[in-house]
Amino acid sequence: MEALSISDTEFYAFVGFFIGHVIFQQVQISVRFSRTLYMALLKKKGTSNDIANETLKTSLDWIKNNSVDQMEFVLKSGKKVTDANKEEFIEEFIYEETYGKRVGYPAMAQGFSKAVSDDIYNFQPHQLERLLSGVDHISIKHLKTLAIYRECTFQTEEVMNFWHILENSNEEFRRNVLRFITGSSSLQSIPGSHSECIIITQMNIQGFLPTANTCFRRIVLYKYKSYSELKNKLERAVKENGGFHFI
């Protein structure tokens, strides 16, 4: 089979479009990028804090706080750097260190822009990271704020036991339960977002395994004689759960 013929620019543009499409579809992928990439996608200027080399950061601080009239710096235009225009030099330097050396960033940003709405540019880099990859830790406290109850309340015995089970479980089991309910093992955890709710329904039938519908982000709990019975049946339901889902 022949290798696909594609230019570097086209490849980077595709990657950017893919990232944007993942966010548009409100799913997450198990990947982490650098802060500078998120800033490039959001078309935000870098700062000296985004420069990894501490020596270069120290040099920029020195330039900010001292006279450079006698130095031999030049701007990209070839114009000599003076105290009057040194901020322009600093901005050019930061751009080069954060974006300029990463040749794929412009094409990725262009591809990304074709898959998202302009509203995305109001986000901060850490928020974009959460949209794309979710959060590192599943907070049960936060998860509770997303819950909508049908045919039950927060004080229904099975519901209280369900939350206690999650509170006493490890991170892996929490993610498996979240995947069981929603199809994804991650939470975006963006302030003000209402798209991550989970629906908890309780049915007055004895002893069935918990069931879930990922399309509606819903879990159905039944009647159980004890905390232990629900725990065992939830573990079994999650373990036996299969099919298509996003990581």
Image: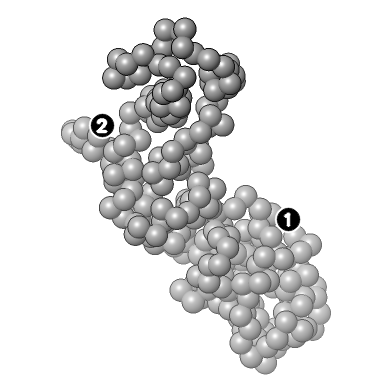
Circles 1 and 2 in contact, beta carbons < 8 Å? no
Q: Residue at x 20, y 35 (%)?
A: 6
Characterize the local packing of mark 1: few (<14), some (14-19) or many (20 or more) Cα atoms within 10 angstroms. few
Q: Quadrant of the N terminus?
A: top left
Residue 65 point in image, percent of width and height: 58, 21
Q: Is residue 185 visible?
A: no
Residue named by callout 1:
170
**Left or right of residue 237: residue 223:** right
Secondary structure beneath disc 2? helix
Residue 12 point in image, percent of width and height: 30, 37
**Left or right of residue 65: residue 228:** right
Quarter of image, res 62 = top right
User: Given the image, on which type of amino acid does mark 2 rest?
Assistant: Asp
Q: Residue at x 69, y 54 (%)?
A: 171
Asked if 224 appears above or below 32 in the picture, the reply is below
Asked if 37 appears above or below 187 in the picture, the reply is above
Residue 59 shows which numbered tag?
none
**Left or right of residue 126: residue 122:** left
Distance Cα–Cα, label 1 vs label 2 = 42 Å
In the foreground, 185 or 68? 68
Residue 247 point in image, percent of width and height: 50, 54
Q: How many labels does the image show?
A: 2
Secondary structure beneath disc 1? loop
User: Given the image, on which type of amino acid does mark 1 rest?
Assistant: Asn
Asked if 206 appears above or below 25 in the picture, the reply is below
Residue 48 point in image, percent of width and height: 53, 29
Quarter of image, res 237 = bottom right
Residue named by callout 2:
8
Q: Residue at x 37, y 27 (%)?
A: 100
Q: Residue at x 66, y 53 (%)?
A: 137
